[in-house]
Image (cartoon, coloured by chain):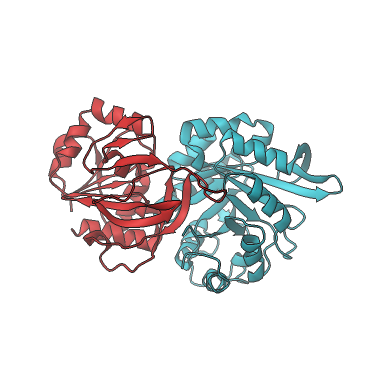
Amino acid sequence: MNVAVVKYNAGNIYSVIHALQRLGVNPILTDDPELLQKADKVLFPGQGEASNAMHYLREHGLDKVIKDLKNPILGICIGQQLMCRHSEEGDTDCLGIFDADVLRFVPQKHEDKVPHMGWNQLEGPKSELFKGFCEGEFVYFVHSFYVPVCENTIATTQYIKPFSAALHKDNFYATQFHPEKSGSVGERIIKNFLEL
Amino acid sequence: MLAKRIIPCLDVKDGQTVKGTNFVNLRQAGDPVELGRAYSEQGADELVFLDITASHEGRKTFTDMVQRVAAEVSIPFTVGGGISELKDVEKMLSAGADKVSINSAALRNPGLIDEITYNFGSQVCVVAIDARLDEKGWTCYLNGGRIPTDRGLFEWAHEANERGAGEILFTSMNHDGVKAGFANEALARLSEELTIPIIASGGAGCMEHFRDAFAVGHADAALAASVFHFGEIGIPELKEYLRAEKINVRL
């Protein structure tokens, strides 16, 4: 299988590459539009700050390339946030694939620590991405911004309030959590994505 | 609901774990990568690898080990030991570590916390504090608990929090190795006063101690070494027990 990982200025891209390799897939890391368009599957991972990431994507023409992809693409963490309309982080206009705005977590009580970091549960998972999933499986999150529940939501998680743990629209999939760091549950999600 | 975390800690010297292990099915019992993977399969939520090597060659071996862990283990892991400046952090993160833990270097140069947070985000920066309680109160120590400082536990933890640390890993030197429970009173005060997660360390001897660290100490995570390495407590049983005690853990 021909799998591409979007090369840009976000951190933590190698953990996704390792996760794919553990599943026997050797992805290419590339910012070449043609290679991204030709791939069977594309992953758009990363950790970082929204305005810097969007600036880089625009400068390299990757914003349009990603928006116009017809093959299945999975955004992870900042990848999911960049696929939305706008982010409060750096007041950033994003790719606008999902019809939702990214907001900053506002703690309501002392226990509400930001970033939301650690293992939390998926509620109401519905999508091919979660084939074979039960209610309440744990996945690993690290984030200070979130996507509210919207019509593209395919799983929610409760932290301060329910938010979108994953999104889906047409060929675009995204998770706020890190499947590449979520043990065997995360491996199943990546495998399901590769089998779409 | 966000789960409480169980974190085995592995001391690594010249690329090998130093404490004995009771894992039977490992090809190499002393290989930290195999041990880390075994813990991950048992349900550990995160791993900590501490480099206790002094030599330059040993440090290189540790970096190679971090790369192997990143390739083979699918849960988050923190590395610590000998991280004294930003370029050490960069080296560990580019080798694939998710977080770094800094201890003496932060006490000597608190600005290192700001530098790490500015460059890589606060979630990367775990500030480890070794402290001992005596008649004067809780005092922070340097160099693995060998050198006392003039810093108190709570004021230093506050400063680390304000400078942007992502988590505090607090080891009570009074409790470490004694196996009589964690320092729950100090943990509860840290948890009450700070706005970041607290990892309890030092004192685990039985499953009830973990429950108390969460229920009484309000810790977000509990770290232990020997009770796991010597097989005295298995992670699956510990998590079943905690779940029965109404502590939310990942099963």
Name the residue at 22% across, 61% down.
Answer: A128
Q: Note whether B234 is above or below B174 in the view shown.
A: below
Q: Quadrant of the N terminus of chain A?
A: bottom left
Q: Quadrant of residue B164?
A: top right
Q: Residue at x 35, y 45 (%)?
A: A77
Report the front residue among A26 and A30.
Answer: A30
Q: Whole-percent x and y of residue B119? A: 48, 31
Q: Residue at x 72, y 65 (%)?
A: B179
Q: Colour of chain B?
A: cyan
**A157 or A181, which lies in front?**
A157
Q: Is residue A119 above or below residue A142?
A: below
What chain is colored red? A
Quadrant in the picture for the C terminus of chain A: bottom left
When asked about the image quadrant of residue B237, the answer is bottom right
Rendering coords of residue B191 (x, y %): 63, 50
Q: Measuring from the top left, give residue B139's x and y in whole percent.
A: 78, 43
- Res. A174 in view: yes
Q: Nearer the viewer, residue B78 or A85?
A: A85
Q: Quadrant of residue B148?
A: top right
